[in-house]
Image: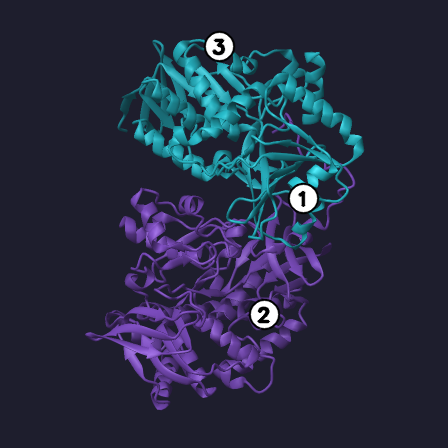
């Protein structure tokens, strides 16, 4: 067996949007970087998600980072030399009934308290003006004009081009099977090759736990398969990204006229093949909710449904920060379905943390030792977790 | 709505599916046959139950009619239903999700036989997407189903037995045929010659082919051999076709241009069900991996007939019988000994027919220059309007796996899910990379197999209640 040794300043494991972004920013800082990806760059959640660029509904911990993320997308073309299909069409959360109004106001107050992300409360008329064709029983909405959507496939492609441009080494179909350490140097084994660097960044997404496991670090994460539906082209129906305040839904209509429907409904993960299986009941619920919200969708034809694999953490906040047991090891995964839009900003801040050996303020809430509260709420549903954290914040 | 559970569900009511139905019933299995057409027979025997058009099916009409009649007594027939998804949960039954006039239903079955037949190889050249350019299979379906005869001059272009047959059928139906442009390279006949003797003594295909050629001559259809560089011209619809023949370029006016470049197994359902495929250089194309009984890489899922590899109607009938018998054995209805006894004649016949097929495959092997449109402006993916040039640009940029190309260009992402363009795109990328087509891979198929109204999929949800359990949940078990 031929053993090739390659030395770098940093190795990033995982070619999703986070791995690619942090590798790019590390390269900007002048580091010699290798990115090791088991399958294909953007082959999982990063490349096949719905491309939402919005902060709602996010746990409050993430709001300041979300604000920075929104500004980073507004400048994405300067970074990646491609607009990545980013369209700042805003994000509308429809309020279905008057009962939801108090909670909607609380949610806006929370956004104001933890961030400067602009949100506007719309009454019935303003809602109808902004987005015609909505369910007539809707009573209002929360509109965030700085949000929007981007094209995941195009973003990953742009990242790839930039990585090549700055001379980062990108290796696809390179699964890291073993990680060892010698004199402050990490050695990652992929098949018959060894890759060495003093800095190792784990951006393995849903498989971040396995990578952490290779160095003996235990982290809690649950892989989930998030389902998406796309409808064939229809006449322009959506002016903005449309969701609901009280229930999970997200719909957008890119410029090609297709309609993407999601919202975080889970299929099944098939671990052995890294494949997914759709759940018909939950998809039906997702689609029925979409149709209720925008009745014109009734006549749309579903042309494709799929799921992408992501990792959810017990408190639904990502793990971003240094390892609790090893020096020179950083983790950045578990984005709990909010990963795509946080990619560019997290990559920039984490690279800064690694180079300066100091974690920026915005990333501190996501340290791996963020406390027992994470474990305590591990079985809670998203909404419940959000409320718990608000209690603690008060 | 969920229907009763069956021992065997068969998708496709052509010769393979019909024969399987009859035999499964004989073995005591409960079966259901699902077909998207309103009548049985598949594409090859489309309209077989209509009186007065036996001439369209030749000598096969008699046994085909018997096959349909027998199948009708052998179990439930669900015609006019499209399969849009196939799901299989561990050891449970296979769920076949179908769509008909009454909405969506789910058929449960212990075994699934995919008998979806063949699809035509796409033949792309400048102008092939113009209205008035149709595939031979499409024209034949119109002849058989609606007895539609085109008015105005017709030109046929391409290669393969079906093109010749359709030329003859059109002529007999009263169409005005301006020319038959045969693109089969002269070298093919030389290469196939050594296989001729074995094929001629194995079945009737060679003799039928000769008969076809003689009939075309007798009908005085002008034939141009070794044709290359086809271009269809026209504004809103095809008006003329230009081509190279010998040393010069020629042009014919036409209202209808019929194209054909051979057939390939329809693997959409097999891929959706997760069956693995292999590259078959004789076609060349992807075919599902099946053993001699029709078992695929997915337990419980079987494939027979042209969907498993091109063999023709008679082969399909025998393969359908073999697969049904195998299913009956797996389900304990008959013993292995009984299976072997029953299918011995079918297997022997399949072997002889295989020799015939080898000859035909070699004779009509489409050369690369016909499979790959040279003009960069030629549309490849009709749904998303992606050109050959856009695909070549990806290949030049080093993107060489077809699903990656799909993600980047959207080629194959439209409502047809790459049914038409998948094969073309792979050929173009492989050609541009100078790589083997098998290294480019094949498109993943996502449900639904065919577009389904959102209303239908949403129908079963009750949104007045909270979402189904664990719609969005962190669970430790994962």
For image coordinates 65% across by 59% down, the residue present is B99
| Residue closest to the eye, B56 or A249 | A249
Q: Nearer the viewer, mark 2 or mark 1?
A: 1
SS class, disc 2: helix
Write down the quadrant of residue B241 in the picture.
bottom left
Q: Colour of chain A?
A: cyan
Judging from the image, what is the letter of the chain drawn in purple?
A: B
Check the residue under mark 1 and report the chain it is in: A
* Residue topped by disc 2: B18
Labels in figure, total? 3
Determine whether A360 is above or below A310 in the image: above
Identify residue for label 3: A325
Q: CA distance from mark 1 to mark 3?
A: 46 Å
From mark 2 to mark 1, how far is it between C-alphas? 41 Å
* Residue B183 occupies quadrant: bottom left
**Residue designated by label 1:** A290
| Disc 2 and disc 1 in contact, CB within 8 angstroms | no
Residue that sits furthest to the right in the current view: A99
Look at the image and tell me whether residue A335 can be seen: yes
| Discs 1/3, front | 1
For the question of whether residue B204 can be seen, the reply is no
Neighbours of disc 2 within 10 Å: few (<14), some (14-19), many (20+): many
Q: Secondary structure at mark 1?
A: helix
């Amino acid at each position: 067996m031929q053993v090739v040794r390659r030395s770098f300043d940093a190795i990033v494991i995982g070619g999703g949007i986070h791995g690619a972004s942090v590798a790019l920013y590390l390269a900007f800082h002048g580091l010699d970087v290798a990115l090791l990806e088991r399958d294909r760059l953007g082959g999982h959640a990063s490349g096949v998600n719905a491309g939402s660029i919005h902060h709602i509904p996010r746990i409050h911990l993430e709001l300041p980072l979300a604000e920075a993320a929104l500004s980073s997308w507004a400048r994405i073309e300067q970074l990646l030399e491609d607009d990545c299909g980013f369209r700042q069409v805003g994000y509308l959360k429809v309020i279905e009934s008057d009962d939801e109004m108090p909670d909607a106001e609380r949610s806006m107050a929370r956004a104001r308290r933890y961030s400067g992300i602009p949100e506007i409360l719309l009454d019935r008329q303003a809602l109808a003006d902004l987005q015609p064709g909505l369910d007539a029983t809707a009573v209002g909405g929360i509109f965030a004009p700085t949000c929007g959507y981007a094209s995941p496939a195009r973003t990953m492609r742009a990242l790839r081009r930039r990585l090549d441009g700055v001379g980062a080494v990108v290796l696809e179909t390179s699964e890291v099977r073993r990680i060892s350490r010698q004199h402050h140097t990490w050695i990652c084994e992929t098949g018959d090759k060894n890759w060495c660097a003093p800095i190792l960044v784990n951006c393995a997404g849903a498989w971040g736990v396995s990578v952490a496991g290779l160095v003996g670090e235990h982290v809690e994460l649950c892989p989930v398969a998030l389902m998406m539906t796309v409808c064939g082209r229809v006449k322009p129906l959506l002016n903005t990204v449309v969701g609901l305040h009280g229930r999970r839904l997200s719909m957008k209509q890119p410029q090609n006229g297709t309609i993407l429907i999601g919202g975080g409904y889970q299929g099944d993960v098939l671990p052995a093949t890294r494949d997914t299986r759709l759940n018909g009941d939950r998809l039906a619920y997702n689609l029925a909710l979409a149709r209720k919200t925008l009745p014109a969708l009734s006549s749309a034809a579903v042309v494709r449904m799929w799921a992408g694999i992501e990792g959810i953490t017990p408190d639904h906040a990502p793990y971003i920060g240094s390892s609790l047991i090893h020096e020179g090891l950083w983790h950045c995964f578990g984005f709990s379905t909010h990963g795509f839009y946080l990619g560019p900003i997290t990559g920039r801040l984490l690279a800064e943390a690694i180079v300066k050996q100091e974690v920026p303020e915005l990333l501190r809430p996501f340290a791996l030792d963020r406390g027992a509260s994470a474990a305590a709420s591990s079985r809670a549903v998203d909404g419940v977790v959000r409320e718990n954290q608000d209690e603690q914040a008060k | 709505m969920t229907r009763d559970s069956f021992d065997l569900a068969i998708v496709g009511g052509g010769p393979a599916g019909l024969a399987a139905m009859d035999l499964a019933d004989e073995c005591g299995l409960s079966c259901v046959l699902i077909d998207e057409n309103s009548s049985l027979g598949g594409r090859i025997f489309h309209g077989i139950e209509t009186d007065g058009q036996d001439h369209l099916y030749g000598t096969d009409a008699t046994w085909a009619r018997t096959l349909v009649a027998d199948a009708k007594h052998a179990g439930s027939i669900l015609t006019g239903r499209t399969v849009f998804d196939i799901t299989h949960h561990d050891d449970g039954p296979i769920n076949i999700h179908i769509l008909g006039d009454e909405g969506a239903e789910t058929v449960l079955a212990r075994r699934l036989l995919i008998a979806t037949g063949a699809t035509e190889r796409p033949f792309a050249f400048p102008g092939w997407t113009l209205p008035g350019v149709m595939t031979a299979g499409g024209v034949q379906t119109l002849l058989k189903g609606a007895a539609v005869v085109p008015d105005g001059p017709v030109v046929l272009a391409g290669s393969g037995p079906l093109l010749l047959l359709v030329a003859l059928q059109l002529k007999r139906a009263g169409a005005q045929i301006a020319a038959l442009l045969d693109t089969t390279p002269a070298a093919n006949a030389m290469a196939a010659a050594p296989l001729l003797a074995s094929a001629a003594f194995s079945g009737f295909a060679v003799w039928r082919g000769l008969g076809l050629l003689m009939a075309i001559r007798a009908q005085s259809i002008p034939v141009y051999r070794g044709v290359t560089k086809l271009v269809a011209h026209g504004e809103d619809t095809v008006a003329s076709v230009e081509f190279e023949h010998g040393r010069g370029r020629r042009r014919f006016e036409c209202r209808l241009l019929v194209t054909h470049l051979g057939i390939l197994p329809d693997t959409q359902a097999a891929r959706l069900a997760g069956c693995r495929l292999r590259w078959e250089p004789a076609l060349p194309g992807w075919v599902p991996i099946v053993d001699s009984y029709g078992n695929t890489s997915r337990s419980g899922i079987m494939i027979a007939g042209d969907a498993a590899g091109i063999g023709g109607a008679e082969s399909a009938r025998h393969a359908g019988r073999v697969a049904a018998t195998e299913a009956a054995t797996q389900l304990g209805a008959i013993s292995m000994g009984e299976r072997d006894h029953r299918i011995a004649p079918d297997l022997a016949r399949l072997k002889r027919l295989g020799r015939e097929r080898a000859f035909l495959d070699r004779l009509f092997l489409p050369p690369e220059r016909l499979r790959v449109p040279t003009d960069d402006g030629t549309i490849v993916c009709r749904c998303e309007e992606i050109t050959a040039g856009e695909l070549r640009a990806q290949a030049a940029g080093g993107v060489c796996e077809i699903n990656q190309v799909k993600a980047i260009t959207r080629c194959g992402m439209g409502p047809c899910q790459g049914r038409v363009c998948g094969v073309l795109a792979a050929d173009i990328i492989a050609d541009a990379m100078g790589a083997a087509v098998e290294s480019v891979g094949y498109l993943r198929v996502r449900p639904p197999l065919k577009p389904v109204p959102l209303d239908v999929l949403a129908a079963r949800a009750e949104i007045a209640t909270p979402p189904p359990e664990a719609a969005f949940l962190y669970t430790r078990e994962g």
